Amino acid sequence: MASTDEYLYIPFENGIVEIEKKTGKPIILQDITSEFGYVNVVNGYIFYNAFNNNENKRGLVVQSLDGKFLKQISKMSYFPFVVFGEWIYATNLRGGDLYKINIKNSEQIMLAEEPVEEFALHENGIFYSDGNNLYSINLDGENKQKLLSGIKLKSITYSNKDNTLLFINSDEENGIYSYNINTNKLTDVREGDYTFVQVFENDGIVTLNSSGLLQSFSLADGHIDFQIPEVTNFQIFNDTLYYFDQFKTVYSITPQNNKPNKVYSLREMN
């Protein structure tokens, strides 16, 4: 899933649907099949891993939303990836090497050797896990520092407000932990079998557990703002949360009202 100010972009089995946020009006973007169902949309261009028999059109590509421009960035596919400025930060599949790839000339620079299981990008650097340790590097792959050792974690998210990382600790039955970079303090935030976590405005975070329960709660006092069952996945864009339920319907939630608003159902395309 990807987002701009006006539109939401959702990969599905046969392409990508562009949904106008205000009206829910869908437009099918033809001839775009995104491998891994993963896309970024930046300044009128969509970045995705393309299925294509033509070797010059497969792999990681960038395409204008009107379909008039297509450029192959790499013949290889990458997942996950994040577009940041003139570079794409990506791993060649989970557990692979971490690279940055220049959008204009396809220059590829290795930042960290495999295995890179998870990474989180911020404006000054990257945090990543090799499965047993947590590291930080700058955007050029330099100044490597080990932050935590002997810890298996997943779903890393960064809070710029207090320079804190939040993640799921696989060594502790998939509970949520925080790590303050300024103080080096590791804190047990919440017990539970969680699969995904993200920062959600001010001191809040949003979690999804293995039973499909979506929750938002405050880091300060632990109070729950909302909880919604039967959710399959979610993402947050510009302080708005979007989630799928088990019936492939997309809803949005803002911090102002904490109530779901239906955006679109992918089943309506059939």
Image (cartoon, helix red, strand yellow):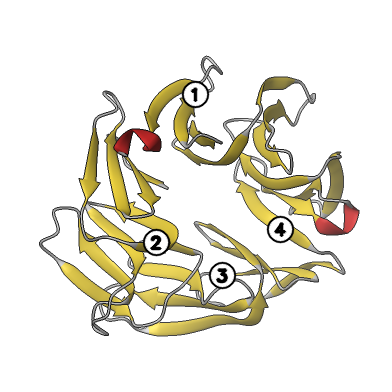
Spatial CA span between label 4 and label 3: 20 Å
Q: Quadrant of the C terminus?
A: top left
Q: Secondary structure at mark 2?
A: strand
- Residue 142 visible: no
Picture residue at 66% right of the left edge, 31% below the top? 203
Decide which of tag 1 and tag 3 comes sooner along the chain: 3
Decide which of tag 4 and tag 2 comes sooner along the chain: 2
Spatial CA span between label 4 and label 2: 21 Å
Decide which of tag 1 and tag 4 comes sooner along the chain: 4
Q: Secondary structure at mark 4?
A: strand
Give the residue at mark 3.
138
Give the residue at mark 1.
254
Picture residue at 23% right of the left edge, 82% below the top? 54
Q: Residues within 10 Å of mark 1 (few under 14, many from 20)?
A: some
**Residue mark closest to the camera, 2 vs 3:** 2
Give the residue at mark 4.
154
Please say if 5 is above or below 60: above
